[in-house]
Image (spheres, rainbow, N blue to C red):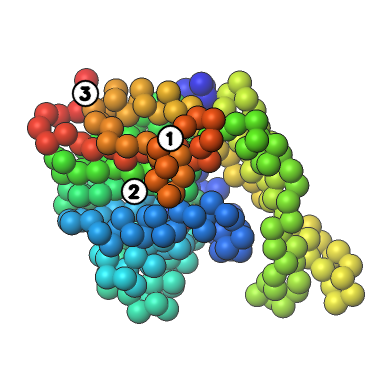
Amino acid sequence: MPPADQDPDSGNQYDRFADIYGVWTDTAPAARANLPFYSELYVAAEGPVVELGVGDGRIAVEAARRGARLVGVDASARMLERCQARATAAGVADRLTLVQADFRTFELDTPAALIALPYHSLGHLTAIDDKREALARVFEQLRPGGRFVFDDFVVTDRARAHMRQAQLRSIFKAPDGTDRLLWVTSLLDDPDQRITVITWEDMLDDNGRQIDRQYRKLELSWLTPEQAQTLLEEVGFKIDSCWGDFERTTFDPTRANEQIWVVRRPNSGSRAA
Ligand SMILES: C[S@@+](CC[C@H](N)C(=O)[O-])C[C@H]1O[C@@H](n2cnc3c(N)ncnc32)[C@H](O)[C@@H]1O
């Protein structure tokens, strides 16, 4: 398990990542797959919907365009600025309430019917105690019967081999007009279940020569499905489903690309001690 003594500045690391987040997700197969899944959940929910780690509003603004009203929580001021701008451009700013807060301490005005934490974002809390604290917070902020939906990595040999490759993700024009190549790879630390995602951008001149390179990194960790189940039950959740992909295929550890948990705060009773 990840050591319990780490307190990552997981929101701050996104302040340094915000300007390339859109290019990064536009070219990520997992982001393409999770967008319809979560946006449909938000639109269909009856009652207050909250997206934790709302980021640049990639999912939330799409759901708002389709009529949903949401609260978006994120620790990163830069990501929230992008979300606000995206909501305004889409004409749905009045359907989105944005709150700058941490997964572990956020507080809602009204208990939620649905809280979602998409795109492996629980992984940004790299210590197991921090993950437990966030799950307990979610439990407390849900109304009785309310659902919590999140996904986490499934780290198989196939996934390891894919993540370790250096992948050219995009060629794009930066706001200053220069052409840039966006590359990504990941370092995996199996004993500690840690992933360091490293991106780098090559900035090119008009002749295609590299004039500069910028590196960035994101720290993540993963839970095994067994650890996820244990944590969820410790906190008091009842498990409705665990799917292995965004088409809602029942989780099978030999085939799954994702672990997607749909859990519920029971109608009666408080959090497990
Ligand atoms: C992978 S992005 C997901 C953004 C969006 N949900 C999506 O699917 O595109 C993770 C987001 O979680 C936020 N985040 C990371 N750690 C956080 C924390 N401890 N509390 C609140 N937000 C956090 C980051 O700032 C970032 O915007």
* Image point (72%, 78%), residue name: 177
Compare marks 2 and 1 and give the one earlier in the sequence: 2
The residue at 51%/37% (across/down) is 256
Asked if marks 3 and 1 touch (Cβ < 8 Å), the reply is no
Q: CA distance from mark 2 to mark 1?
A: 19 Å
Instruction: Decide which of tag 3 and tag 1 comes sooner along the chain.
Output: 1
Residue 266 visible (yes or no): yes
Q: Position of residue 232 (x, y in %)?
A: 32, 29
Front position among marks 2 and 1: 1
For disc 2, the marked residue is: 116
Label disc, if present, on residue 272 of the rendered structure:
3
SS at mark 3? loop
Kind of residue indicated by mark 3 = Ala
Looking at the image, which is closer to me, 160 or 137? 160
Q: Report, in whole angstroms, how far the alpha carbon at label 2 lies from the one at label 3.
A: 21 Å
Residue 41, image x, y percentages: 31, 55
Estimate how packed mark 3 is, as few (under 14), some (14 to 19) or many (20 or more) residues with alpha carbons within 10 Å.
few
| Residue 257 location (% of width, % of height) | 53, 40
Q: Which residue is mark 1?
A: 251
**Earlier along the polypeptide chain: callout 2 or callout 3?**
2
Question: CB of mark 2 within 8 Å of CB of mark 3?
Answer: no
Q: What is the number of the mark on residue 61? A: none
